[in-house]
Amino acid sequence: MKSSETDSMEMETARRSLEDKIAQLNATIDEVRQQLGNVNSNSGQAVNERPLTKDA
């Protein structure tokens, strides 16, 4: 195999590896965003559901 062919195959392998890692990161970001959304919406409900008192 020529050096340029080897280099090309290595570049392709590196590109695919990076694409896989980016996809994993994006999935993790989406999961965390969803979890934070759930936490924020639950916090908002808890605040809204608290009874108002004259002392507060």
Image (spheres, grey):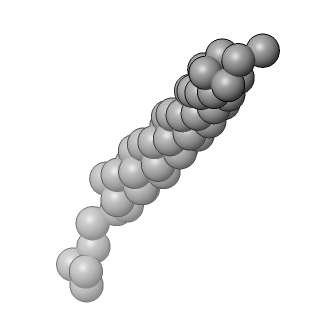
Q: Nearer the viewer, residue 46 or 36?
A: 36
Q: Which residue extends farthest bottom?
A: 55
Residue at x 47% of width, y 49% of height: 36
Residue at x 61% of width, y 21% of height: 4
The quadrant holding residue 56 is: bottom left
48 to 23, vertically: above or below: below
Q: Position of residue 17 (x, y in %)?
A: 66, 30
47 to 15, vertically: above or below: below
Q: Position of residue 33 (x, y in %)?
A: 45, 42
User: Which quadrant, please, contains the N terminus?
Assistant: top right
Q: Position of residue 14 (x, y in %)?
A: 63, 31
Residue at x 70% of width, y 17% of height: 2
12 to 39, vertically: above or below: above
Q: Position of residue 25 (x, y in %)?
A: 56, 39
Q: In the visual, does 18 lie left or right of 53?
A: right
Q: Nearer the viewer, residue 20 or 8?
A: 8
22 to 42, vertically: above or below: above
